[in-house]
Structures are given as structure tokens and as C-alpha cells.
């Protein structure tokens, strides 16, 4: 089992939770429910690894994708016929954990993005200041 990192990774995927939510979208495809289930299990496993690595952005996106794929699976006719079977494979605890972790990560990311915004404003201001100096020198 990998060790848990102590400090969250720097934000790198987006500058807002809204942008991250766009990355969680999954287009329904005409594949078997079995393939959806296999994909969901891989997504959940990768989300757990990202959480342990303290990659909050990627973990959030993957947990949300897991929930989306899970909901796609629930709408399938063969899921409705064999709910117990699919629940035993997917694990009811996994969906619960994915939702809880996504909520927790959402709050953490909101705070981190909020803290980051003032820093970005300063850097944008410095860039403008730099370009004004360049313009004054050359023009």
C-alpha cells in the first residue's frame, strides 16, 4: 500500500470547480454493462490512488466520473434485472465512499482555489506592469 503524501499537490488541472466538473462528464456509449462495470472499478481504484497521493483535483474528477458511470450502469436493463449481482461487484460501499470523498474534496478544492485567486491577480498585475514598462521603453 503506498504511503500517503502529507501535502496536497499543487492545483494544475483547472482554476475552478466548474472547470473540473466539466472533466467529469461521461458520454453514454453502446458498450456492454460488463465493460461499464470494469471501467467503473478501474476509475474507483485510480481515484483511491490519487487520493493517497494527495492529488485532490484528479481524485475529485475520478470519484465524480465513478458516480456518473455508476448512474449509467443503474439505468441499464440488465442492471435492473440483476441488481444484487451488480451491487456485489461494484460494492455499495464504493459508491458511498466516492460520494463522500467527492464532497470532501469539493470543499477542500473550493478553499484552495479561493486562496489561489488573489495570488493570480497579483501575477496578472505584475505582467501588466511589465508590459507597460516594455511599451514605454520601445515606444
Image (spheres, rainbow, N blue to C red):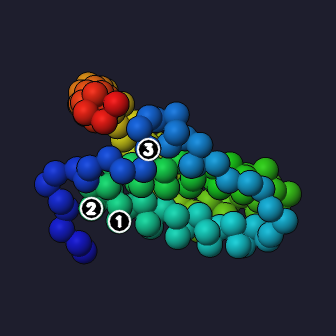
Circle 1 sits on which residue? 49
Seen from the viewer's position, the closer of residues 38 and 20 is 20
Q: Residues within 10 Å of mark 2 (few under 14, many from 20)?
A: some
- How far across and how far down the image is residue 47, in percent? 42, 60
> Is there any visible trace of residue 111 in the rendered image?
no
Can you give x and y, in whole percent of width and height, for residue 43 in the image?
52, 64
**Quadrant for the C terminus in the image:** top left
- Secondary element type, mark 1: helix
Q: Are marks 3 and 2 in contact (CB under 8 Å)?
A: no
N-term-proximal mark, 1 vs 3: 3
Asked whether the beta carbons under mark 1 and mark 2 sit within 8 Å of each other, the answer is: yes
Marks 1/2: CA distance?
A: 6 Å
Residue under the point 32% across and 47% down = 11
Residue 83 as seen in the image, left or right of residue 61: right
Residue at image mark 3: 14
- The residue carrying mark 2 is 53
Residue depicted at x 14% and y 54%: 6
Alpha-carbon span between mark 3 and mark 2: 18 Å
Regarding mark 2 in the picture, which secondary structure is present there? loop
SS at badge 3? loop
C-alpha span from label 1 to label 3 = 20 Å
In the rendered image, residue 3, in percent from the top left (x then y), is placed at 18, 68
Closest to the camera, between mark 1 and mark 3, is 3
Q: Which mark is residue 124?
A: none
Amino acid at each position: 500500500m503506498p504511503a500517503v503524501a502529507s501535502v496536497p499537490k499543487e492545483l494544475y488541472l483547472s482554476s475552478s470547480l466548474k472547470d473540473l466538473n466539466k472533466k467529469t462528464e461521461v458520454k453514454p456509449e453502446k458498450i456492454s454493462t460488463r465493460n461499464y462495470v470494469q471501467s467503473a472499478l478501474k476509475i474507483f481504484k485510480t481515484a483511491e490512488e490519487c487520493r493517497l497521493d494527495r492529488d485532490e483535483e484528479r481524485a475529485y474528477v475520478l470519484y465524480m466520473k465513478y458516480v456518473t458511470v455508476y448512474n449509467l450502469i443503474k439505468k441499464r436493463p440488465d442492471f435492473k434485472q440483476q441488481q444484487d449481482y451488480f451491487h456485489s461487484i461494484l460494492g455499495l460501499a464504493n459508491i458511498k465512499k466516492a460520494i463522500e470523498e467527492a464532497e470532501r474534496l469539493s470543499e477542500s478544492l473550493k478553499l484552495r482555489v479561493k486562496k489561489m485567486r488573489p495570488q493570480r491577480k497579483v501575477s496578472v498585475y505584475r505582467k501588466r506592469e511589465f508590459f507597460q514598462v516594455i511599451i514605454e521603453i520601445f515606444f
